[in-house]
Image (cartoon, rainbow, N blue to C red):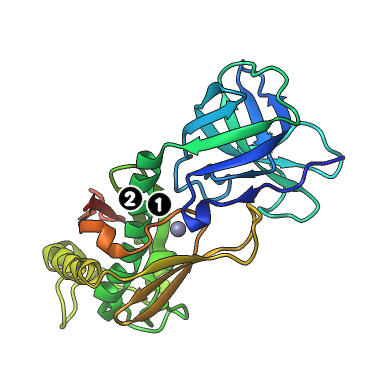
Amino acid sequence: MTLPTTHVSFPAGAVTGESTVIAVHPLGDGRHAVVTGATPFHPLDHTWPDQPADLGTLTVDGTELAVVDCLTGAVGPDGGTPLVGADIPVRRGDEEWSWLVLHVVDTDPGDLLGRTAVLTVDADRRAALSASHSGCHLLALALNEALAPRWRKDPGRSDALGHPDFDSLAMATSVMDTEASTDTYRLGKSLKKKGFTADATDEFPALADALPALTEAVNARLAAWVAADAPVRIEVPGPELTARRQWHCELPEGGAQIFCGGTHLHHLGELAELRTELRLSEDGTELVAVTRPKRA
Ligand SMILES: [Zn+2]
């Protein structure tokens, strides 16, 4: 028998929960993965590992175990040990497979099967990661707007606010931690072919020279959104880990949606400030945005 896909409560912002232990798997390095039917823990996603794992504790009958990592595990139709990371041979959410939140403990927890675990996420770390993740999506929208004049033709993909979607068309990597979100964009030939120009034109200077003004424009937009205390929610089509969730923010310019598996603020007034720094890589082929939220 294979295990059911884990039900998750982190999209609504939960940081505590109680659930039955349905499996314990040795991970081969002394560590073990504890699987429960439901969990508030946000695991590292194996296909889009932008948001780091939640940490915290798992308590069974008064014995507390530290959750030192949290991973996405996948079990095929034939059962067996969950695969993680690059070992998973199928697409995220493949319906033939079970998708599990693996709470990693660095000891042998003994026989926990069928017992009730109290699950407690490190709430401060979660809040910091949620702030960085919301900041990441807002940066995307503000940057798309600031760079919109640099598209010489319609690249065929717009964001929720109607601007050419530089963020998704140029995205190389997106990494967040408890301090910031770092988004790296590739300014290569393919972006140029789609119509984006980093060169000087009659209307604006080369991107390198425009960075201070661009940074100022993006930061002004971010500050206005924080000041508007825009509400944020995650639209959840189902309780399963693999449900296709959507970040939704009610900005003054209109509702903005982005598909997202992470955790977020409930409203932007939870921030005192959100600022980004834009720079170009030395060879000029990458634009890097480091976006730091300051929590209120
Ligand atoms: Zn996201």
- The disc labelled 1 sits on which kind of residue? Ser
Q: Is residue 152 above or below residue 199?
A: below
Is residue 39 shown left or right of residue 262? right
123 to 142, vertically: above or below? above
Disc 2 on helix, strand or loop?
A: strand
Q: Residue at x 29, y 72 (%)?
A: 197
Estimate the x, y position of residue 4 in percent, counting from the top left.
Answer: 76, 46
Q: Position of residue 211 (x, y in %)?
A: 16, 63
* Circle 1 SS class: strand
Q: Which mark is residue 154?
A: none
Q: Is residue 194 visible?
A: no
For ligand 1, give the image quadrant: bottom left
Of circles 2 and 1, the one toward us is 2
- Asked whether mark 2 and ligand 1 are closer than 8 Å, the reply comes as no
The one nearer the camera, 14 or 196, is 14
Q: Quadrant of the N terminus?
A: top right
Q: Is residue 93 above or below residue 268?
A: above
User: Residue at the spot x=50%, y=30% of the render?
Assistant: 57
The residue singled out by tag 2 in the image is: 181
Image side of residue 269 versus residue 14, left or right: left
Q: Indicate the quadrant where residue 105 lies.
A: top right
Q: Amino acid at mark 2?
A: Ser
Q: Are marks 2 and 1 in contact (CB under 8 Å)?
A: yes
Say whether residue 189 is left or right of residue 26. Answer: left
Determine whether the beta carbon of the residue marked 1 sits less than 8 angstroms from the nearest atom of ligand 1: yes
**What residue does disc 1 label?**
174
Q: Is residue 220 above or below residue 118?
A: below
Of residues 208 and 272, the one drawn nearer to the viewer in this rendering: 272
Q: Label 1 neighbourhood size at 10 Å, few (<14), some (14-19), many (20+)?
A: some
Q: Position of residue 90 (x, y in %)?
A: 72, 49
